Image (spheres, helix red, strand yellow):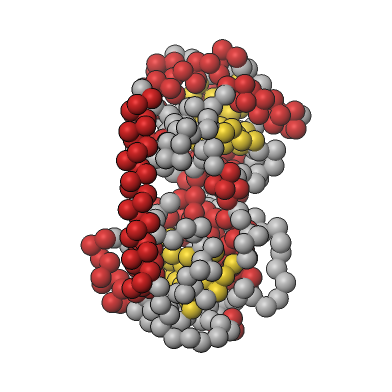
Amino acid sequence: MDWVKKIKAGWRLIRNKVKALKLNLYRKVYDKRVQEIDFEPSKIKSVLLLRWDNKLGDAIMCGNFIKLLRQYRPDIQITVLTGTTTKLWVEKAAPADDYIIYTKAKRKQIITDNKGKFDLFVDLGTNCSHKDLCLASQFKAKHYLGFNKQHYHLFDVEVASQYVHFKDRYIAAAKLLISQPIDEQCPLPIPEFSQQRAQLQQFINQAQQKFSHVVGVNLFGSSKYRRFSFEHAKALIFQWRQQFPDDLLVIIPTPGEDKFIARLVTAVKDNMVISPNFPASFEVSLAIIDIADFTFTPDTAVVHMASALNKPVIGIYRYNMQNYEEWKPVGKYSQRLLNRKPFSENDSVHVHEFDWQDLVLARATILKALA
């Protein structure tokens, strides 16, 4: 199979080179300011926050930016350019003033309706693709706030490079617009989930299983490389139950994966492996994470929900330390598992490719800290 991986890596290398070439070409056309004016925070009255990728983890992290501006700069009108999933989270956790729902079909109309409307455009992504640059420039905002974009002419306001983690990055961005001191702790805002927590606690109690620990289990990430296949999920559960028979495993419902989870629970035939028969929702995920002693998950939104709750998590990360530092869990006692090293820069590694003994150690470390 090594030759298959090498062919795929070769294609990814070509694709990445094409992307780099496109970015260089787009910069010649779009990396330009409308007008050269000094940035004065007090004059910023309208902000557009870019979250058009519709990724839930990013939406969770940007909550502090909205929350802090609401508290310290209520004079600023906040609009989020987003997708339907991230809008739903933001609406429940840290409501903005307005939302622009991005679709490719409505792109031209969105630009036409909002060109020149905003004092500040905010994009805190580490990298800037040719698509990001093209879209951002067409809004013709007075100012552009970014991270790691000091070499772009379009961006005239920069979050300092020391703010690597996205939670810190959004807080730092908000502070650029706020004159008074703010609370440095800044817990991430989350939706209310007390009702779902009570229902979940009742569900666990009804199971009438004798267990020492409750473990939340998420098997799905945002790409095929960050989700467990059915066979690898089944192997994981079997091995976990064999080595840790006192753990009650609660599989977190995930949108679109109800059949996968039901089939998995049926296949393992173990009363200590359960999944609530509730529709998947942010609130149900939060409830499981909150009740569990810790949660096991790929690097995905579940990690950041645990961070918002300050709960332990074992997160599985690519062997990419920059990505890890940007997205690592910040909940107390949290641990990481690193996937194997890729054999080349363009080799994609699957989420199940980690050392089992690292998981054993991570679990023991968390439980010792909680004792």
In the displayed structure, 156 sits above or below 369; it is: below
Q: Nearer the viewer, residue 71 or 200?
A: 71
The part of the image, by quadrant, that contains residue 180 is: bottom right
Give x and y (percent) for residue 101. 34, 63
Q: Is residue 260 left or right of residue 152?
A: left
Of residues 162 and 66, the one drawn nearer to the viewer in this rendering: 162
Name the residue located 65 percent from the left edge and 44 percent from the top edge.
Answer: 331
Figure check: 307 above or below 161: above
Quarter of the image containing the N terminus? top left
Q: Is residue 136 visible?
A: yes
How far from the left and from the top, in percent, is residue 292? 61, 33
In the image: residue 101, left or right of residue 123: left
Task: Describe residue 21's horizontal placement relative to residue 178 as left or right.
Answer: left
Q: With 231 as the anchor, is 41 left or right in this view?
A: right
Q: Is residue 10 above or below residue 18?
A: above
Residue found 60% across the figure and 39% down from its top = 290
Please name whichever residue, 322 or 76, is drawn nearer the observer in this view of the structure: 322
Q: Residue at x 51, y 87 (%)?
A: 37
Q: What x and y, as percent, mark residue 323?
A: 54, 47
Reply above or below: 242 against 80.
Answer: above
Does the rendering let one see residue 202? no
In the picture, which quadrant includes the C terminus?
A: top right
Residue 4 percent location from the top left of the image: 33, 28
**Total label count?**
0
